[in-house]
Image (tube, grey):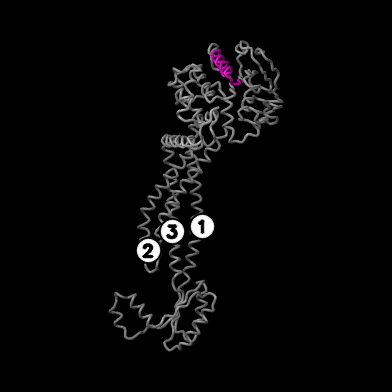
Amino acid sequence: MIVLHQVSKVYPNGVRALTDVSLEIPERDFVFLVGPSGAGKSTFIKLLIRDELPTSGRVFVNGQDLARLRRSEIPHLRRKVSVIFQDYKLLPNKTVFENVAFALEVAGHDRRSIERLVPPTLELVGLKEHADRFPYQLSGGEQQRVAIARAIVHKPSILIADEPTGNLDPATAFETIRLLVKINALGTTMLIATHNRELVDIMRRRVVELEKGRIVRDEVNAGYE
Amino acid sequence: MEVPAPLGVAVRYVRYAWVSALTNLWRNRLMSLAAILSTAAMVAMLSGFLVLLHALHITIEALESRVNLIVYLRDDAAPGEVTALREKLLQNGNVVRVEYVSKEEALERLRRDMADRRDVLDAIPGNPLPASLEIWVRNPNALSGMAQQIRREPPVEDLDFNEPVVSRLLAITNLARGIGLLAIGGLVVVTLFVIMNTIRLAVYARREEIEIMKLVGATDWFVRWPFMFEGTLCGLAGATLAALAVSLAYGPAMQAFIGVLTFLPLRVDPWFLVKLNVGMLAIGAAVGAAGSYLAVRRFLNV
C-alpha cells in the first residue's frame, strides 16, 4: 500500500520535480506511471525507496511515514520495496545464481535458506537452466529477468520497475511485462514507470500520467493516452 | 519477507567482511603497501619518541633520588651545635629530609665505594673524612640561596651541592614533549590521509557493488565492515613492522644509554617495551579504522 499526500519535491538546485501529488496505490494493484522524460517519474520512485525526501507533503509505504524512518531502518524498507532498472544493475563477476543470492546475503540469510529460496525464484522467471552463467552470457531480456529474480527473492510487498523495457525489443519487452503480471498475480504490488506506449495500450491497466511534476490523469483500464 | 536469525547473521557478516577485506587488500596491493609503510614510519617515530621520553624520565627520577646538599661538619663541632643545626634545617619548608653521617660511616662508605683500591685506602692514616649532614630538598632551584645561609652556621666546615640539573632536564623534557607531540600529530594526520585514500580507492573500485547493496537493502555497517577491516589490517600491519624494528633497536639503545649514565641509579621499567608495543599496535589499528570510516562515509549516502 502506497499513499502520497500532497507531495512536492524541489531539489536544492531549484528544479521543481513534483508538485502537489496525491495518490493511493492499494495492495496488489498494478499501475503504469507514464509521462515524458522530466515529468517526475524518477523522483516519484526515489521518494518511495527513501532515496529522497519530499520537500512538503507525506509519503506512506505500508502505513509507515517515510519521513519518520530512521536511517538504520532504510535497509528494511528496501527489502519490502524492491526496484528494477532499465540497466539491470547486475554484478558482472557473479553468476546468475550469485546475483540473486546477493540480495539474501546482504540481508543476512545463510547458505541453507539461500539454497531454498533462489531456485524457485529462478524457475519463476524462467532462468533455472542459466543459473551458472554470467550476465555477459545472457541476452538483455534474460538479464532483466535476473534483476527481477533478485528483486523478488526476499518476497517484497511492492516491486517498482523504472523503465524495465527501455533496452528491450518489443517481443522481449512484452514477455518481461507478462512476467511482472504473473508476479503481481502472486500478490506483489506493481508500479511500472514506462515510455512504452504499445505495452500500456495492450495491458489496459491503471495508468497514472505525470506531466511537469503534476498528476494529469489517473484512470483504470486505460491506455497510454 | 523472510527474517534470518541474528547470531548466524553476525557470524556470516564477519566472515564475509574478512574475505572482502583480504581481496581488496590484494587487489590494491601497491596502495596497501604504501599505507602499511607510512603507518610503520609513523608508529616507529612515535615509539622512538616515547623511548626518549622514558629515558629522560628515568634520568630525572634517578637525579631526584640523589642527595641535594651535603654540609661537612667541623671535627670540633659540639654535638649540641649539630643537633641545633639539624633542627633549624628541618624547619625550612624546602627541606624534605636531613640525614646525619658520622666520620666512621663516611669512611665505611668510602671503603665500600673503593673496594677495588684497597692500597690507596690503606695508605691513608687515621680518618680524614668529616662528619656531614645530607639534605634532600623539594625545589633544587633554591639550593644556592640556602647554601649561602648554611655556610654561616658555626659547625659548618664546608658544603657541597648539586647543580639544579633536574629542573633543567625537566625543562628539556617538556620542550621535547611539546615538539614531539606536534610532529607526531602531523604524522598521524598524514597516515590517516594515506589510509583514507587507500580505502577510498577500494571503495571506488566497488562503488557499483555498493550501490546495488544499498538498493537491495544492505545496512550501512554491512557495506562498511569490509573496508573497516581492510584499513584496520593496514594499520595493524604497519604497527607490527614498527614494533619489530623498535624491539630490535630497544635493547642495544638502552644498554648504551645506561652505559653513559653508569653513575646514576637508573631504574628501567622492565615492562616498558611490552607496554609500548601494545600501545603502538592499538594506535595503528585505531588510525586504520578511523581512516576507513572517513573514506566510506561519503559513499554511503546512496
Indicate the secondary structure of the residue bearing disc 2: helix
Question: Which image quarter: residue A152?
Answer: top right
Residue sitting at the far front: B5
Horizontally, residue A57 falls left or right of residue A173, namely right
Q: Residue at x 41, y 36 (%)?
A: B26
Question: Which image quarter: residue A223?
Answer: top right
Question: Mark 2 or mark 3, which has the lower sequence index?
Answer: 3
What residue is pinned by disc 3?
B52
Mark 2 or mark 1, whichever is nearer to me: 2
Mark 2 and mark 3 on one chain: yes
Q: Provide the residue span drawn in magenta.
A: A173-190
- Quadrant where the C terminus of chain A is found in the figure: top right
Label 1 crowd bin: few (<14), some (14–19), many (20+), radius 10 Å: few
In the rendering, at what x and y percent does residue A197 appear?
62, 13
Q: Is residue B220 one of those drawn in magenta?
A: no
Q: Is residue A180 one of those drawn in magenta?
A: yes
In the rendering, at what x and y percent does residue A29 appear?
63, 19
What residue is pinned by disc 1?
B178
Q: Residue at x 44, y 71 (%)?
A: B66
Indicate the secondary structure of the residue bearing disc 3: helix
